[in-house]
């Protein structure tokens, strides 16, 4: 089985692109989704995050207040590194188990916003970067998450720029609201199936 990473900066549309691959029958492991889920369900992760950030980062139902966590970590690189040191190993272990369940597929996708930054590209055969202009990404996230430009810019500052990701990638999908995405996905899909 071929293991493919799919990444892109916040607001690039990587999740939308990954959904096109899913429609083609390709399993997608969304590392960002599972990171959020693990924060709310894994007792050891919850304990460690409470130690790092305080009890008030979880609400009365035991759900992580991601906005509160974001306010802390995107202003303090050390806190971001501490958060990642708790979350990434837990996601990595979960992902290994998920991978075993899909061993019969020709290839799988691992979707992660900070694939290269976290070292999540290790062990992958190829990487796809979804690219979009910074201003378009900014506007998409403001609209999607109902946040300020400053908040989005702070998140972007913790991610590599497109040029750096593209230089390390095997494929690039342009998602600029002008270029058609599906033909780009189909071209890559055919190449990956051909091996």
Image: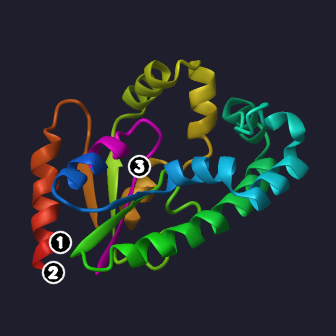
Residue under pointer 1: 192
Magenta span covers which residues? 1-17
Q: Is residue 130 above or below residue 118?
A: above
Label 1, label 3: how far apart the Cα atoms are = 19 Å
Query: As rendered, which of 178 and 101 lies closer to the eye?
Result: 101
Q: CA distance from mark 3 to mark 2?
A: 24 Å
Q: Residue 15: image x %, image y %?
A: 36, 44
What is the quadrant of the N terminus in the image? bottom left
Residue drawn at point x = 67 percent, y = 52 percent:
41
> Percent x, y for residue 84?
69, 57
Please tell me whether mark 2 sits on a helix, a strand or a loop: loop
Disc 3 versus disc 2: nearer the observer? 2
Give the SS element for disc 3. Answer: loop
Q: Is residue 169 left or right of residue 114?
A: left
Of labels 1 and 3, earlier in sequence is 3
State yes or no: residue 11 in magenta: yes
Q: Residues within 10 Å of mark 1 (few under 14, many from 20)?
A: some
Q: Is residue 195 above or below residue 74?
A: below
Q: Residue at x 37, y 27 (%)?
A: 136
| Residue 118 visible somewhere in the drawing | yes
> Residue tagged by mark 3?
8
> In percent of the image, x 57 and y 60: which residue is there?
117
Q: Which residue is mark 2?
A: 195
Residue 35: image location, x then y, percent: 59, 53
Residue at 29% over, 78% down: 2
Q: Left or right: 73 with respect to 96?
A: right
Badge 2: few (under 14), some or many (20 or more) residues near its Cα, within 10 Å? few
Q: Are marks 2 and 1 in contact (CB under 8 Å)?
A: yes
Seen in the picture, residue 40 relative to 120 is either above or below; the reply is: above
Q: CA distance from mark 2 to mark 1?
A: 5 Å
Determine if residue 119 is in view: no
């Amino acid at each position: 089985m071929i293991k493919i990473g799919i990444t892109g900066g916040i607001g690039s549309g990587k999740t939308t692109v990954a959904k096109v691959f899913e429609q083609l029958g390709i399993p997608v492991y969304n590392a960002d989704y599972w990171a959020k889920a693990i924060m709310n369900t894994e007792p050891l992760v919850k304990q460690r995050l409470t130690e790092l950030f305080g009890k008030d980062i979880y609400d009365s139902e035991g759900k992580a207040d991601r906005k509160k966590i974001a306010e802390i970590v995107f202003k303090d690189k050390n806190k971001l590194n501490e958060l990642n040191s708790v979350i990434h190993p837990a996601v990595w272990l979960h992902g290994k188990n998920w991978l075993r369940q899909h061993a019969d597929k020709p290839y799988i996708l691992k979707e992660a916003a900070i694939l290269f930054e976290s070292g999540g590209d290790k062990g992958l055969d190829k990487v796809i970067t979804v690219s979009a202009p910074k201003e378009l990404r900014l506007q998409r996230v403001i609209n999607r998450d109902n946040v300020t430009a400053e908040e989005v810019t702070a998140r972007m500052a913790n991610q590599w720029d497109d040029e750096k990701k593209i230089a390390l990638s095997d494929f690039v999908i342009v998602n600029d609201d002008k270029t058609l995405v599906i033909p780009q996905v189909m071209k890559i899909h055919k190449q990956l199936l051909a091996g």
